Image (spheres, grey):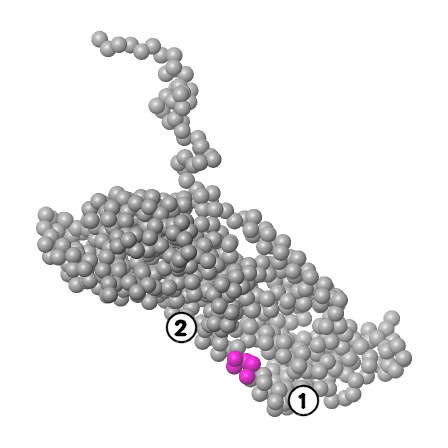
Amino acid sequence: MLLRSGAGLLAALVLFGWLNCPAGAQHGQDPVPSASSAPPSGANPTAQAVTEEQLLQEMQKLEGRVSIPDYKAALLEQPQGRGYQFFHEGLLPWLMGVLIVAMVAGLALFFLLRGRIVTDAPQTGIKIRRFNVLERATHWMTATCFIVLALTGLNYVFGKRLLFPLIGPDAFAAFAQWSKLAHTATAWPFMLGLLLMAALWVRGNLPDRHDWRWLRELGGFTSGTHPPAGRFNAGQKLIFWSVVIFGLVLSATGIIMMFPFWTLDINGMQLAQYGHASAASVLIAIIIAHIYIGTLGMAGAYDAMGKGEVDLTWAREHHSLWAEEQQPRVRARDDGAGTAGAPAE
Amino acid sequence: MARLKFLCDADRCIECNACVTACKNEHDVPWGINRRRVVTLNDGKPGERSVSMACMHCTEAPCAAVCPVDCFYTTADGVVLHSKDLCIGCGYCFYACPFGAPQYPRAGNFGSRGKMDKCTYCAGGPEQDSAELEYAKYGRNRLEEGKLPLCAEMCSTKSLLAGDGEIIARIYKERVVKRGYGSGAWGWKTAYRETIST
Amino acid sequence: MPVILASIALALVLAVVAGLGLHSMQAPVYQSQPMQSVRVGDPGHNLVGPNWSGNPGRPENSERALNATFREPG
């Protein structure tokens, strides 16, 4: 259902763009009646001609007809450009900056207060397979691409503010050129990985009856309890759906921007920018939290994706229902210190 | 200090495209780049109007503000210019420009659209080392010879005015008073945040 | 670890392939913006030639025009 709403948003965006299709621009508009109804006379031959304020009030942008094949040139004036300037220079740096800094600060505070989350019981040394090779390869490919995309994307907003003063105009321009190429090129493996991840894990991330309890107890992050969870707990499901939905929004708006004016006109392209930048701000903040919990925040979590196997204690405490299902497939340690029960078949 | 502006008298423009031709010829503008263009509103219908449009060299230029590599600069006369060496061809300036002035030599694939090109008010660009290089990159620099932009000089009806903002505003106002009608200075509210009361 | 390195390598390879593919789709504006008039390198099909009959789109008329005798008025 969340996925369908994401697709619905996408469809709405494309539909909005088609309604503003630029192909009509070169063929002129229906005549807009002028402000004055007086007939043209010698004293005022342009009595019935349109004026700028009138057109702007009625159509918000001025479009006419040109004799050159560049249909975009038929747009005489779009004052929305100033609105784009406000978003890009006034709003976006604050939105992105505040979200990211607040997330980092919040995580730092959480780490200082709670420390690293470790298992209550000691490690057994018995490992369960958590993610197979395909899942891990997909995750790491997508993750690498996301890091590159995030850094090169942040460069568009903050590069001239933070990096430019350090390295000067020529070096920064060369860096910005390469960073832009990296952004558009890395987007493709990211989109491929995103689709693969969605396909691999959508079943495990559908909501179930344990999610509400997990969320109510905040996953035990503050209380220290261990609410039961399946293969993916509610927090992970939130991450999954955030990545899928925001990732799809980023992919769609990104493709729209990568082929300028292919489907949308100037106002549509501006909207695509707003969507892309806003979704990126949110997703980067969320992923920072995801990286935190998967590395520093919780002991034993990294092994899940890094090696593919987790300790049985870790599984029992954090994903109790999943650990029970996996019981028959537990692999005993080489020195035979297994206490899990029947060895792997 | 003069503050240079453009003013197109939409009541006089006859869509002859002399301004376009003059600009293209003087700066050797390649095919597909339209520094100046004439847009006709209500073409062929009652109330037809033509306006010649190029970069308006706005006050607080939006293009300069959104450029991620800060390749724009405004001269003391108010002319907005940019450096093609720093430009990465991202296209943000086109989204910000209310008048569609930035032009790119390649289509498609944000990323390699080529260096942005636009009307320079016949003031060339930041190429100090050689005049040939400045001409090849940015076109003729008429301003340093004390001349006004060629589009306005070549306008057949003197509808396109270029020069100090106060002087051309005064010329336009006198015209409107003398002939009794005037549709205003198109684009001035968005570009310079001022209008000419007629 | 080997899985991670292989994934990074795969991402890099796919990115380079995508970049090259995008680059090949690039076209200068004189190719991408369509026009019906004459263009250098592609003379088009609307040029007037020696068999021009004065009737666009009717090449068969050109034969008659060539063979017709021109009669003086009066």
Q: Position of residue C47 (x, y in %)?
A: 40, 29
The residue closer to the viewer here, B193 or A283, is B193
Q: Residues within 10 Å of mark 1 (few under 14, many from 20)?
A: some
Please indicate, yes or no, whether residue A340 appears anywhere in the rendered image. yes
Q: Position of residue A309 (x, y in %)?
A: 77, 74
Q: Which labelled disc corresponds to residue A90?
A: 2
Horizontal side, residue A117 vs residue B144: left or right: right
Mark 1 or mark 2, whichever is nearer to me: 2
Q: Quadrant of the C terminus of chain C?
A: top left
Q: Is residue B189 above or below residue B20?
A: below
Circle 1 chain: A
> Which quadrant would residue A16 be assigned to in this image?
bottom left
Is B41 in the magenta?
Answer: no
Instruction: Please indicate whether residue A35 sits to the left or right of residue B99 in the image.
Output: left
Q: Is residue A80 visible?
A: no
Q: Chain of mark 2?
A: A
